[in-house]
Amino acid sequence: MKKQIITLGLLFLGCLQIANAQFTLDGEFRPRTEYRHGFGSLIADEAEPGYGISTRIRLNSGYKTEKYKVFISLQDVMVWGENRQILPDDENNSFAVFQAWAELQLGGGWSTKLGRQVLSYDDQRILGGLDWAQQGRNHDAALIKYAKEGFKLDFAFAFNQDYDNPTGFVSSGTEYNTTGFFSYKTMQMLHLSKAWDKFSGSLLLMNNGFQEYEDDGVTGDGTSSLLTVGTHLKYNAGKLGLAANAYIQTGDRQNEVAVKGAFDVSLDATFKASDKVTIGAGVEVISGNDADAGETGAFFPLYGTNHKFNGFMDYFYVGNHANSIGLVDIHASANFNLGKGSSLLVKLLNFSGEQEITEGEKALGTELDIVFKKAFKGYALVAGYSHMFAADGMYDLKGIAEDAASSTQNWAWAMLVIKPKFLN
């Protein structure tokens, strides 16, 4: 690890010697402390709350010429105290190359971007950078891009393989051993978008191929393909803003589960009541599993920034709630501009299942989210509090008896964000 850091440091110094206005070097220091007492799932009455501090650090370097761009982002995520004193190495092996890509200008509005990169589109419902998570989300992919007069076309494709599997590395017919969390072996994505004065719209088509196995669970047996198709629409007219999503999924998930009739639709409205207050309201309906054994009608938003949706306490679609009862999320919010770089968001969300949890039961509960932001010169402070008011269905969904669960399910956090610019 030390040799890697020294080598990268020498590369940076070499770049500095030839640097001009085209070279940039910046970073991020982001510690976050959390109190968890029901974050992600209901906590039992006798369970102790969790508390901890994590820090994300990033070092970003970019170089740009008329014909190409190169960008490298190095990252480490540290939990305070996870390493014992005078330990010579990092126990959690979290140091990583978060992004490493080159973008070539091909002329006529065309370009191509190759390497590890963030794929973020529209409101990040299906594809997003997941910046809330300290580790973030990236893709190893090739991207072909076209942009002209408000129209954009992006086509991405990926083929993933295990370098530590020599047979697999030289033969695409053998197994890909990286599985879980919708990790794909192949991916093809087409995103078309067009913007006008008050309206914009996009179309997304994405196919993911997942490694399948024979009965021994080891030998590769082809891939399952899951197709996601949908649109994102936005309209802004003065104080009023509208946004809508409509997506469907068909094909096969991992483990050859057939997907039929899966959908995600949403509508959100915002209204700027004054210079100080913006109010919002919306609804999202995500289909749940109503299919026979070996099939599912449940939609999953795949590679989006899911923490942004369905409540900040991450009860749904954040590494969980796959192939479940779906979700109906009805929400309202108010965002207050407090002046001097300060704002306060208050959001209330009511949850129920798109399918019944038990006979006649769909209600899951209500969540309250509060987020305060304060920008200072050179840094920002963000803090939040969330409270889950669980309904009967939530206890069944999370597998805990109501009389065994804590009467208080809450989560509080605070985060400092510093993004220094070393060279520009």
Image (cartoon, rainbow, N blue to C red):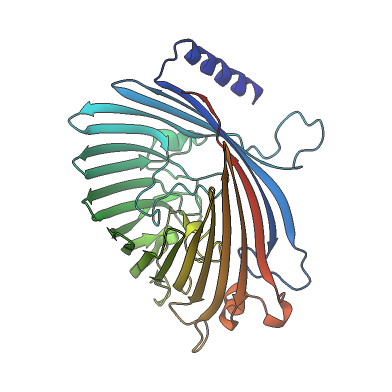
Quarter that holds the N terminus: top right
Residue name at image x 66 percent, y 67 percent:
410
Q: Is residue 403 depicted above or below 58 in this figure?
A: below
Q: Nearer the viewer, residue 23 or 273?
A: 273
Q: Identify the image quadrant of residue 167.
A: top left
Q: Does 377 sit above or below residue 68?
A: below
In the rendering, at what x and y percent does residue 4 appear? 59, 23
Q: Specify whether 154 is left or right of 98.
A: left
Relative image position of residue 140 (x, y in whole percent):
42, 38
Front-most of 218 and 28? 28
Q: Is residue 323 visible?
A: no
User: Left or right: where does residue 131 sit relative to residue 209?
Assistant: right
- Residue 422 in view, yes or no: yes
Which residue is farthest top?
17
The x, y position of residue 256, in whole percent, is 40, 61
Which residue appears at 17% of the width and 30% of the height? Answer: 108
Q: Is residue 61 above or below residue 278?
A: above
The residue sitting at 28% across, 54% down in the picture is 204
Please tell me in which quadrant of the rendered image residue 151 appears.
top left
Foreground residue among 8 and 421: 421
Q: Residue furthest bottom?
A: 360
Q: Position of residue 255 (x, y in %)?
A: 44, 60
Check the image and report above or below for 105 versus 342.
above
What is the number of callouts on the image? 0
